Amino acid sequence: MKRLIFILALMFAFAISNAQTTITTISAGDASQTYKEYTTDVTLTNTTAKAIYFNMQPAQYTAQNFIVQLDSLSGNHTNVAVAVYGRISDQQGWTAIGSAINWTGVHASAGADTTILFANATEVAYRQFKVLYTGTGTGTTNIMYQALKIWNGVP
């Protein structure tokens, strides 16, 4: 019985420690669906990475822009790494799109505000996109706004 309780406790701890996810979809066949916003506030801590997924149906060659706005809530996140990934299907591993951008309250490339822009001009046939936020230090950060813009291209 003790083993069963221990195993259940481990499973519960694993479940809450995994990255929390949100999924949104862009209908690529609709010309008005080349921009998708996720405006629900998400709180990031230093203990749990968070991810948002953008799905695109059907796959086509696109260039992408991803915009995120971050704001410090409490404490001191010494760093928040924002990384963007893409893949063609569920059977494929994630491929990094550019390098992660590190935010420490104000990102140098973002100016005085907290807006970060990823721009990928290389057209790829990714059907799924993942944005992963990883916080370090102590404190919380508010992910206030996220948006993916796809630029339709030719294969």
Image (tube, rainbow, N blue to C red):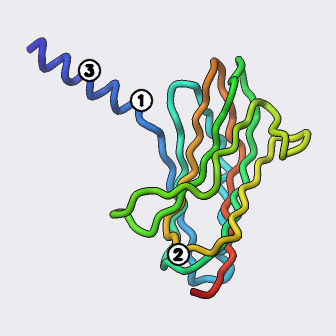
Q: In which quarter of the image is residue 143?
A: top right
User: Mark 2, mark 1: which one is toward the viewer?
Assistant: 2
Q: What residue type is labelled 3?
A: Ala
In the rendered image, residue 80, in percent from the top left (x then y), is placed at 66, 34
Residue density around tag 3, few if under 14, some if 14–19, many if 20 or more, within 10 Å: few
Dot 3: what SS? Answer: helix
Q: What residue type is labelled 1?
A: Ser
Question: Residue 120 or 130: which is nearer the viewer?
Answer: 120
Kindly check if marks 3 and 1 are in contact, taking CB atoms under 8 A apart as contact.
Answer: no
Residue density around tag 1, few if under 14, some if 14–19, many if 20 or more, within 10 Å: few
Tell me what residue is drawn at x 50 percent, y 55 percent: 23
In the rendered image, residue 119, in percent from the top left (x then y), is placed at 72, 61
Kindly identify which residue carries mark 2: 125
Between disc 3 and disc 1, whose residue precedes? Answer: 3
Kindly identify which residue carries mark 1: 17
- In the depicted structure, whether residue 140 falls above or below residue 6: below
Q: Residue 9 carries which label?
A: 3
User: Mark 2, mark 3: which one is toward the viewer?
Assistant: 2
* Disc 2 from disc 1: Cα separation: 32 Å
Question: Residue 6 or 93: which is nearer the viewer?
Answer: 93
| Viewport quadrant of the N terminus | top left
Q: Which amino acid does label 2 sit on?
A: Ala
Tell me what residue is drawn at x 33 percent, y 29 percent: 14
- In the depicted structure, whether residue 122 falls above or below residue 53: below
- In the depicted structure, whether residue 71 falls above or below residue 82: above
Tell me what residue is drawn at x 57 percent, y 73 percent: 124
In the rendered image, residue 29, in percent from the top left (x then y), is placed at 57, 84
Tell me what residue is drawn at x 74 percent, y 39 percent: 70
Kindly check if marks 2 and 3 are in contact, taking CB atoms under 8 A apart as contact.
Answer: no
Between disc 2 and disc 1, whose residue precedes? Answer: 1
Q: Residue 106 carries which label?
A: none
